[in-house]
Image (cartoon, grey):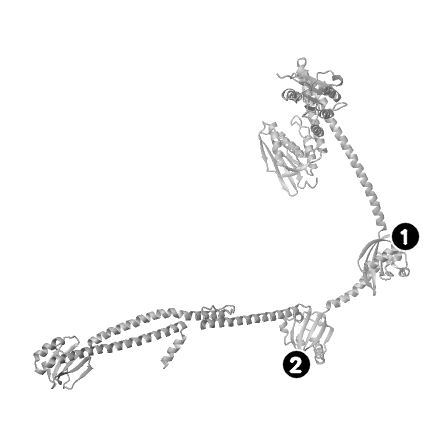
Amino acid sequence: MRDLRTILLAENNPKDIELTLEALSEFNFANHVAVVKDGVEALEYLRCEGNYKLRKPGNPAVVLLDIKMPRVDGMEVLKAIRDDPALKMLPVVMLTSSREEPDLKKCYELGVNAYVVKPVDFKEFIEAVKQVGVFWAVINELPPDGE
Amino acid sequence: MGFVLSIIGYFNKQPIKIKLMFVIMLTSISSLILTGVTVILYEHYQLKQYLLRDISALSILIADKSAPALANQDYRLAEKNLSTLLIKPPIVAARILNEKGDEFFKYSAKDNMTITFPTGTKRNGYSFENNLLLFFQPIIFDGKQIGTVFICASLKDIYTQQQYVIFLVGMMILFSSFFAFLLSSWFQLFISKPILYLTETAQIIASQDDYSLRAVKSSDDEIGILVNSFNHMLDTIDWQNKDKKILINELRESKSNLNTILDTIPLSIYWKDKNSNYIGCNKTFSDFAGLDNPDLIIGKTDFDLPWKQQADKFRTDDRKVISSGIANYHIQEPLLTADGKEIWVDITKIPLLGPNAKINAIIGVMEDITESKQAEENLRNSEARYRFLFEQNPLPMLIYEIDSLMILSVNDAFIAHYGYTEEEILSLHVADLYPEEEKLAIADLTKKIFGLVYVGEWHHLKKDGTQIIVEVHSHGFLFEGHSARIVVINDITERRRVEREIQTLNSSLEDNVVNRTEQLQEANKELEAFSYSVSHDLRAPLRHTSGYVDLLIRRCADDLSEKGKHYLSSIAESVHQMGMLIDDLLQFSRTGRAEVHKKNTDINNLVSEVLENIRHDNPNQSIEWIIADLPHVFCDRAMLKLVLINLLSNAVKFTRTRKLAIIEVGFRDESDEFLFFVRDNGVGFDMQYSHKLFGVFQRLHSTEEFEGTGIGLANVRRIISRHNGHTWAEAELDKGALFYFTLPKNNEEKL
């Protein structure tokens, strides 16, 4: 089995966090997930600032971003990542509740790598999370380090 | 003599070719015959001479030889000497006679030959007798004649030879004649052909009357000169003909022009001799006279024509003109025409001078003036009518003189509206009606426009000083000898006031519209925010519920009773249903708000895309699809796809109970729109509920029977109506349903 890399999950709803982790744990991804509660924390994590000053350096394999979050929302995080030379190549997947066309359009304009709508049905949800996890944390080749 | 003349007559009739040949042949044959005869005669003479010479030499020889024998009377010697000499064929007999004339020796070529010899001794010389040559030669011995040798030779040989010669000469003449004939018939062509050709040309010209043809010159002899002269003559004739034709054409043209002029001018023209008999007239006149054509007038008098009752008067007028030689202009009088109408005519009579400078005819020009007479009458009537119109017109009217601007006349409506008395107004200038600031302008304008039609808006003052707004219509005309303008005045003061009010109302209405639009846009934004929030926030708890229910079943199944499991699966079902409802509702709200992006769309393409999905989702249902060749339509592709998804998946859904579903997609071209339809053989619906079909959350079947949220058709209707189309359906319970929608063709313009 390949080395599993870290997945950063930015999600403010604890139930969603729990359910996402439950879904990921079905495939043994759960131990490799870093969870942040909003955009500010997500950026702190990525830049190793604030609470995450002491974390092991290195970018996660993928960032799963919810759009609706307090303080700094998902799209703002995405924009900050793309504007940051050290982060701009990081794969970002929007994991959100609905496919509102303006959101979809804006995310792609900002350079999102994928946009996944969380299905209401839990079985479908598990399947979607699994696919995202397998693809980004296992199959996909990361951009070279040091960028 | 008569015969010769008839021969000459016959000869004269023969063509020149025959004549030529005849002359040549006659000449050559004559000379040949003459030559032949000469040859024959000469030959005859020559032959005789030869014979004579031969016989003479022979006789001399015989005479010489026989002399001794005769002298000695030695008969045997004579025979011996002579017999050999006498064998010569032409000699038929010979005698030697002694001096007494007795026969001493006798020789005959043939025994039976009897020749009577002349007797006597004196015979000497020769003679030709009876085809015989008789020759006498004296026998001289010792200087004296002792006898005579007589030889008789036949001329038969000569004749034979002669015949031969004649035959030869005859043959020669025959062959020469034949040869001469051949030569002459060849050579005569050189002379006869040009003549024949010339003759032929002359005949063609004579028969076709075509003087543009020319003879071809083929020699430089007299015939050549003749051809030249002939052609020259033709040139002259041709020229003359052309001149003549031009002259004739000119004459014809000028005559026809004259006739056209006479027949088309709207005047009647006639000419009479000095006794008032008609000599001619034009068509207009003959029409008045009731004649079929102008020629029929010749020889008639006024007594023969429809106006015979006026004939005496007309003839008196004619005589006056003829006797005085002075024209009589414009006599106006009534005239009775052939169709029984009495018309008014204006007649001018002019005397015509003949070649001897005497008046011998008269020309009359007559004009039908009935209409102008009528027009005069009408004018009088219309003047009265217009006067009435002016005086009784409900709009104020005035007439003023252009030069002085003095008011000449006003109508009752003017007096009533402006408050002046008639006397007062007639002492005013038109500029007095205008406020101070317009007085100068109106005076200027009057000079500028003079007689033209004018429409304009001005201010007027009533007698009491009230200022009114007026719309004036005016035009120049001649009024009782003055250059004047008539003015129709329309007081539009009230109209202007109302217009201003409407303007104010309109502008406030525009403000209202702007406000309302802003409010509407605000509401729309709020609605968008609301639906955004619904899509995010309403789905989250649902997802959580679904997640935890699933986890409960998954992780804690052992702790749950069967009832508990049933409850959980019911919760899961409801959550699922609610999820679908939210999705559809959001979709519905989106189709109402989203902009319609129309572009040319191939409906076939859309249908096959939709069909692919439907087949994929319903792999076990056997469906017979009947898809027409659909048109291109100007529409929003994504929205129309949603329409087709809804209608086709409905058709599939409601035919699920059929063994073989038959679904048809077709269209009709309805001039300004396309009518599309989707027909299925499914369960259909009761038409009495058809009005509910397209409403939101309206369902005609229970969810247990056929799943669904009741939003699909509402969406269809919303999309189609946003394309300016219509939706409706027909169905029969258990027989199938037929859904229609229309899309206008000129969708582009309504964008």
CA separation in Å, label 1 and label 2: 86 Å
Answer few, some or many: residues within 10 Å of disc 1's Cα (few below 14, many 20 plus, some between 14 and 19): few
| Residue annotated with mark 1 | B466
Q: Is residue B370 left or right of residue B136?
A: right
**Chain identifier of the residue bearing label 1 in the image:** B
Residue B134: x, y in percent? Answer: 18, 81
Q: Is residue B14 left or right of residue A20?
A: left
Quarter of the image that includes the N terminus of chain B: bottom left
**Chain identifier of the residue bearing label 2 in the image:** B
Residue B387: x, y in percent? Answer: 82, 62
**Residue B356's disc number:** 2
Residue B132: x, y in percent? Answer: 19, 79
Residue at x-position 76% and y-position 23%:
A70
Q: Is disc 1 placed on a helix, strand or loop?
A: loop
Answer whether residue B567 is visible to the viewer in this image.
Answer: no
Image quadrant of residue B607?
Answer: top right
Answer few, some or many: residues within 10 Å of disc 2's Cα (few below 14, many 20 plus, some between 14 and 19): few
With respect to residue A45, does B311 lie above or below?
Answer: below
Q: Amino acid at mark 1?
A: Thr
Q: Is residue A1 left or right of residue B73?
A: right
